Amino acid sequence: MLKKKLSCLSLVLILLTTLASQAQLIQPCPDELVPRYNKDKRMWGYSDLFGIMVLEPIYTKVSPFKGSLAVVQKGDLSGVINCDGMVILPLQYEKLTDFRNGKIWAEKNDLWGLLDEKGRIVLASQYTDINPILNTELTWVCKDKKWGLVDEVKGKILCPLQYDMVQVISANATLVKSGEFYGVANHVNCNYLLPLNLQHVKRLTQHELLFEQNNKWGIFHISGKMVSEPQYDSIGLSMPNLFIVKKQNKYGLVDQNGLAKLPLEYDGIGAFNSGYAPVNQKGLYGYTTRFGKVYIPVMYEAVTAFNGGQAAVQQDGKWGIIDIKNQAIVPFEFDKIEINDKNTLWTLSKGGKFQLFPAGAKQFTDAQVYEKVFPNDSTAIVRVVRDGYYYFYNSLTNHLAFNTAFEEAEPLYGGFSIVKQLNKYGVINDQGVAVVPVQYDQIMVAGGNIQQKEWFVKKDGLWGYRNESKVIWPETFDWIYPSGSGLYKVKKEGKFGVINYNMQTLGEIVYDNISMKVPEWPAVVTKSKKQGLLDSDGKLIVPTKYDSIVYCGAAQFKAFSGKALSLIKQNAEVTKTKWQNVGYWNESTIAFEVKDKWGFANSSLEEIIPAQYDALGFFYKGLAPATLNGKTGIVNKSGKWVVQPDYSSFTQDVLSKQTVLIKDGKKYAVSERGKVMLVESGN
């Protein structure tokens, strides 16, 4: 149910970057220009298709040319240039959309206005938010927390600013909300396709909306057609163009035209699979087709979904398997029957013992009984246990793949399994042949050479390396850790170092510890309680003289020597700082700490936002969480509050870059545009 009460300050509306429509007024550049980054200047410009720079790299960020105009950015401000690099709109705007219909939306001082291609004002800067409608000349605008619809070409309001929320559902219609009620307005004259008295609305399919009116549910097509009048207690999607409806505690099916396919006389309807869905009536089950025909009578005590023309059903307390003609394939004599995750193998249980039956098989005969089975192993050959020993069963032949017994066995992976016999480990292939002798104390998959399977093997406390045909390294090392590109971090006689695939030592094996965290290289090494950096050639590129070295993003490390802090690049370039600490690099910025306060610096280590905050996160899409005087909000790269500091704390994920604000035990996600939405109530 759509129950979110969203204002224009809290509604997450992604600003659409639109292409020029059929009314495009701007002609393309004579020569195709593409964005090009200059690594030396660390700036963007434009080159031709041969990579020759045509417009000098002087911009922080650029967009592709649309026609003869492109949006460019210097620092935090944006403007528009033409094919010759001439400034058409000055770089004074916080945000710009792309041109369409010869118009562009521009944000200045946190307010949006509409300009033409010469920078003339079409609509004055007065809107706090906008939502352009794709492939139209229309845009929803927000002012004083109310939304209205603007015609960009005519430069006038089509729908008065009266809605608390708008959500575009098609090029022709928008879901709107005023107070506690929802409606659907068209884009022609803002008349209502659905009246503004709906209690709830949610998207049911790509084209259908489910809506509640006077406590009854109906279905509406976004083209403007009423599929089903509000008459049902509930509606759910069963399959494309087919809906499960409930009325007076009875269930039925209706199609995309609102026509009844299965009458409202069932106590429940399950999900369709293989063209059939289970139905429940008076405590018994049968199956219906999507056309509303109950093809298998309501006669079973319990059922599963059909898979490949077979289903497990229960009758007189016992389970069997039937086909689509309701003919028994497996007799009704089992306590339980289940199909595996891949829908390829049935597990039949009786009296605590198990049998296996391949899905789709036509003939059932009593097979070998097992104490335990592993039907979800990832191949057609799965493990089974008989008399306490592991065997391998071929689900395609319905027999054991081979008769060898094992004390332990891992699933076949890539055609190989690590097994245990007489308390020793080895590796067999899917024919049961030992490709690694059963003589090791421990074996682990190494995942090295992609042409042949490889394993780390341990004997007498030392690790070696081998594949299915030969020993690559003898058992030599206390510890092995694969580190990419044919390199391995190893421990030998209590010391750490680096070797390659050919077991050649790179550098020296002399360190007390070596890092295993991202990035793999350079690795942080420890010697005599001091840390340095080791490259992938085993060369010590930063001497072991620091108390600690920690990765801080953007291929850089922070290093402490006493209270002194230095930043180290991946190429071993060291820069000393006057800061106490730093955060995580992102978007060429990093948070720094001075006198227990935090600010932001750029890639040149220039302090761009003074140290004034209690805590800071990192920038993502130009926004960062910040805490000031015990309150947390979101700031932009100018230090302006985008989300006011009204929250108690924040979390930020380095991998997903997701920022979450926390207040009164509730969690709020922050969008790329600085909008806040409740994601977890904390109850």
Image (cartoon, rainbow, N blue to C red):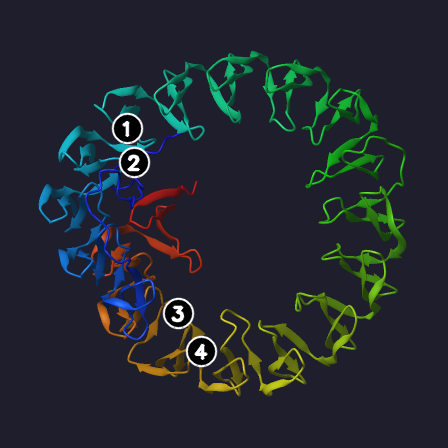
Real-space CA distance between mark 3 and mark 4, rounded to the nearest whole angstrom: 15 Å
Q: Amino acid at mark 1?
A: Lys
415 or 55: nearer the viewer: 55
Q: Quadrant of the N terminus?
A: top left
- To which residue does mark 1 refer? 177
Dot placed on the residue nearer the N-terminal end, 3 or 4: 4
Q: Residue 451's quadrant in the figure?
A: bottom right
498 or 416: nearer the viewer: 416
Which residue is drawn at the image coordinates 72% and 65% (left, top)? 453
Circle 4 SS class: strand
- To which residue does mark 4 refer? 549
Real-space CA distance between mark 2 and mark 4, rounded to the nearest whole angstrom: 45 Å
Residue 13 seen in this snapshot: yes
Dot placed on the residue nearer the N-terminal end, 1 or 3: 1
- To which residue does mark 2 refer? 6
Real-space CA distance between mark 2 and mark 3, rounded to the nearest whole angstrom: 37 Å
Q: Is residue 304 left or right of residue 246?
A: right
Residue 443's x, y, as percent? 75, 67
In contact (CB < 8 Å): disc 1 and disc 2: yes
Q: Amino acid at mark 4?
A: Ile
In contact (CB < 8 Å): disc 1 and disc 4: no
Give the number of the disc on residue 471: none
Circle 1 SS class: strand
Assess disc 3: are there few (<14), some (14-19) or many (≥20) residues with their C-alpha within 10 Å of its C-alpha.
some
Circle 2 SS class: loop
- To which residue does mark 3 refer? 554
Give above or below for 681 relative to 260.
below
Disc tally is 4
* Comparing labels 1 and 4, the label whose residue is closer to the camera: 1
* Comparing labels 3 and 4, the label whose residue is closer to the camera: 3
Residue 463's x, y, as percent? 72, 76
